[in-house]
Image (tube, rainbow, N blue to C red):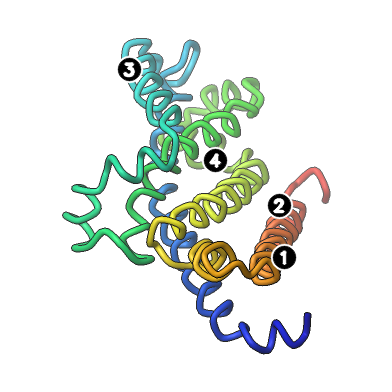
């Protein structure tokens, strides 16, 4: 195994770099789009700080439709959008577009779930003290749900690593591309196994990092 690693280490490390690049950017953009949507869903829900059933239902359906499309199908369907934004349809940068589009509805639901866990009594107390809706969102909803949001971030990141592997099989590069190009097409089962092991290590490290981060900021542990 050591000899195999020495042989493919440069290739695998390049693939890991591309995978982390795709995952990192896609996660960032997914939260920039998905977090406001999640906040909107909670705020406009029944009994929310800005209750609006029409808006809530409309965006709820949009998010559900986005989540229901398989990633491979979505990646092919948004090729014109990918070309428009990235200027090409293959490579790590191009893969960020479908990864972000696929993850944004997922993030919205994770954020909605995290914010919904906040005790309604805390929100009412903030109202009684004259807090505005903006202050309730920033200080109460987001503040109280931060540990849960961090755990959701870990789920999103790990999910996108899996998506990036699928994208790699379709020309995006990264570890998925190495597994297909060297493992499948060249019949190198050992390379396939090594690639999977590397992915497992990366996922475990990411999960451990976010678990420690969530525990560190959870007020209940203080």
x and y, in percent, of residue 153 in the image? 58, 49
Name the residue that disc number 2 marks. 214
In front: label 3 or label 4: 3
Label 4: element kind: helix
Name the residue that disc number 1 marks. 197
x and y, in percent, of residue 69 in the image? 41, 31
Q: Which mark is residue 142?
A: 4
Q: CA distance from mark 1 to mark 4?
A: 36 Å
Q: CA distance from mark 3 to mark 2?
A: 32 Å
Q: CA distance from mark 3 to mark 4?
A: 23 Å
In front: label 1 or label 2: 1
Q: CA distance from mark 1 to mark 3?
A: 42 Å
In front: label 1 or label 3: 1
Choose between 138 and 180: the one closer to the eye.
180
For the residues labelled 3 and 4, say whether their Cβ atoms are less than 8 Å apart. Answer: no
Q: Residues within 10 Å of mark 3 (few under 14, many from 20)?
A: few
Q: Which mark is residue 58?
A: 3
Q: Residues within 10 Å of mark 2 (few under 14, many from 20)?
A: some
């Amino acid at each position: 195994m050591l000899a195999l690693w020495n042989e493919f280490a440069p290739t695998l490390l390049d693939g890991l770099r591309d995978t982390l690049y795709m995952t990192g950017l896609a996660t960032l953009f997914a939260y920039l789009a998905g977090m406001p949507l999640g906040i909107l869903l909670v705020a406009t829900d029944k009994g929310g700080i800005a209750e609006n059933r029409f808006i809530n239902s409309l965006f709820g359906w949009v998010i559900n439709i986005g989540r229901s499309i398989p990633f491979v199908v979505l990646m092919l369907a948004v090729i014109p959008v990918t070309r428009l934004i990235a200027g090409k349809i293959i490579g790590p940068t191009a893969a960020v577009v479908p990864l972000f589009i696929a993850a944004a509805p997922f993030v919205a639901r994770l954020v909605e779930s995290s914010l919904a866990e906040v005790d309604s009594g805390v929100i009412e107390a903030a109202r009684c003290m004259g807090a505005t809706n903006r202050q309730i969102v920033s200080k109460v909803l987001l503040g109280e749900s931060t540990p849960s949001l961090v755990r959701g971030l870990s789920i999103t990141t790990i999910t996108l690593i899996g998506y990036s592997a699928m994208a790699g099989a379709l020309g995006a590069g990264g570890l998925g591309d190495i597994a297909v190009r060297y493992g499948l097409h060249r019949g190198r089962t050992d390379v396939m196994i090594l690639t999977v092991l590397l992915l497992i290590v990366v996922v475990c490290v990411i999960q451990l990092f976010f678990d420690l981060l969530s525990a560190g900021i959870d007020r209940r542990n203080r």
